Amino acid sequence: MRRKRLLTALVAATPVIALAVAGGLSRSPGAAPMLQTYAFTSAMRLVAETGSTDAAGVAAEVPERDTERFSLLGVTWDDPHAVAGGRIEVRTRPVGARSWTPWQTLETDAPDESGGVDGGVTRGASDPLWVGPSNAVQARVVTAGGTRELPTGMRVDLINPDGADDAGPDVAREPRAEMVPAAMERPRRVNGVAIPPRPIPRLLSRAAWGANESIVKEPPTYTGPVQVFFVHHTATGNGYSCASSAAVVRGIEAYQVKSKGWNDIGYNFLVDKCGTIFEGRRGGVDRNVLGAHTLGFNTNASAVAVIGDFRSAAVGTASQLSVAQLAAYKLGAAGNAPYSRVTLTSGGGPKFAVGRRVVLNRISGHRDAGLTECPGTSLYRRLTPVRQLAGAAPAGLRVTGLSGAQAWGRTWFTQGSIAALWRLTTPSRMMDRFDVYVDGELAASRTGTMRGGSLRLAPGAHRVEVRARHLSGRTASAVAKVFADVEPPVFASPPQAYLTAGTVGTTAPIRLGWSATDPSGIRSAAVTGAGAAVLGGTVSSLTGTAPIGAASTWTVGATDHAGNRGSASVTRTPRALSEGAATRAGSWRGIRDTKHLDGTAGAAATAGARLSWTVTGRSVGLIAARSSTSGRVKVTIDGEAMGYADLHADLPQYRRLVFSKSWPVSATRTVTIEPEGTPGRPTVIIDGLVYLS
């Protein structure tokens, strides 16, 4: 972070103000100290003694100094409102190395963002810099345009994140690597439905990253609903690994408490370059804890700091997603749209005087509220897509299926118990929950990570709506039409078995027909017994055979689209009578040939030749031979002409069922046939009659 100053651009020849680092090292017996401080002694008097009249033209450097082990450093001074008059630069020597790091500039544009909210004595300070394990330091101040008075009490603070604290017992702090959720509130109920608690982002709790609770002396202070969410960068540099992120956070905690004089770490959350979220200031992730992060606007606000320096370095996608998740989580909890704006009253700061009304984006950068470069230009430019992600409605929501139901057309059919299944493209971490409504009434509610919910529907038509709720509070819906049906298909009458065209021998050709209806439609029909087949729901007949002289039973099972099954059966016995069993009239010639029924047949070609059979049954069929010279035969039943059967065929056929007639009820009927005397082919050859009893 860097305050806009007139003298920020310095040429390479800009002189250095000589500072002599002095001070003592305080340590706990047997352990490296958490904090080492070295007071700056201005050497500008010595510059004047050299006889120079232009202080800016003279440079001096602090000698190299060995120290106890440390990993983070910063510079602090007495007055929290004072700003360092020059550019503070440091360099360090890594543990085990002989060479020094290049000079690095400390950010000094926000010396105290707490605004005194933590009470006690606070100090002005630069932002800390993570340097990794080191044991030597140098420091200097660069100014231009003449000698400047430095803030009083200026000192270098070296932080060992895992060092001993002189002010209290050395408490062992072993960070735990696992990600743990903070405590959630008890589920509430709406219309008897348990509503899942608002999910807390997956994060490393204070215990998990090894917060030193012994240095936090005062309980947290709470504020009102979060109206604005500020995004910072820590400016601690980018030379850290994700494995060392917890140590960086411990270092920031120690620096802000032990060096700056705050009660606790100032940020509510921190995020590293891998997107890992760290719980910040103590008090409860799900509560509105008053932080120390944005001077004049700490009240009714929450803040995240992305670990690193993003003045020019790009910020990773994982970090942006975590920032968006946190912003949606905190703002959405208060019903505030992350992509909206809000008017706030400044509590007083260098950019906005106390009482000034300021319009801010709900997700703002630190620089929007203060005279600072924070969160760095690179990160600041990513706030628009962060707002879009944090404030988006759930995307791509659709019902992918209903377990326990079958789709038919645009409707799902079930017996009543279903599990609605859905999918969306929005990441689960950005989701609050899913509510399932039946006919406008809340019926189930599931966490944002779940993709299904069970329902029990009453018989009838229903509208099932899955409503996805984003952490921001925005929603999206997907709807399915569902019909619950517990009744099986209904057969208007038992299945019917009829004689049909085919060849008669030891079996007779049979056509089985049925009619089943259901509000859910017929999905399938299965025939068992004398014939077996599984058929589609639109099929209502089946052709097969049945043995002559034996009773055959067919069972038809109809299943509707809800899975209900109804069945009905029919039993019939095919019986055959040869032409020899008929009552004859006129001239008939006997034919003996094994190709005919029972090896015999009767042939006639003259008018007046007749054959008659009297049978009791529901279906009758005439058996005859067909050939290229065969004519037509007239069929009469109980004295009523039924029409003619043409026995002509290009190739000879034997025992063919050439005519059939069926009735819904069984009765005694007389069937009479006689040759037509067809010109050119008057002869007919008759095998006999078959009927169903």
Image: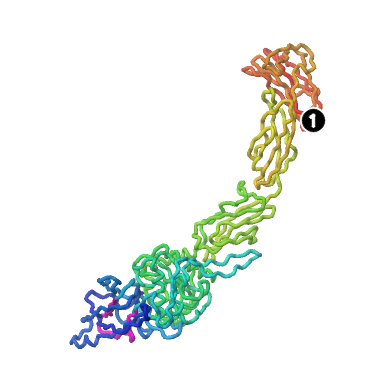
**Dot 1: element:** strand
Q: In the figure, is residue 586 to the left or right of 397?
A: right
Q: Which image quarter holds the N terminus?
A: bottom left
- In the rendered structure, which segment of residues is drawn in magenta? 136-157
Determine whether, in the image, residue 189 is placed left or right of residue 65: right
Q: Would you identify the image quadrant in which residue 87 lies?
A: bottom left
For image coordinates 67% across by 12% down, the residue present is 680
- Specify whether 144 is left or right of 663: left
Q: Quadrant of residue 385?
A: bottom left
Name the colour scheme. rainbow
Q: Nearer the viewer, residue 326 or 256?
A: 256
Q: Residue 406, image x and y in percent?
A: 62, 48
Q: Position of residue 45 (x, y in %)?
A: 24, 88
The residue that mark 1 highlights is 666
Dot 1 amino acid type: Ser
The residue at 41%/74% (across/down) is 250
User: Which image quadrant is residue 502 in?
Assistant: top right
Residue 445: x and y in percent read: 60, 62
The number of callouts visible is 1
Residue 180 shows in the view: yes
Q: Is residue 142 magenta?
A: yes
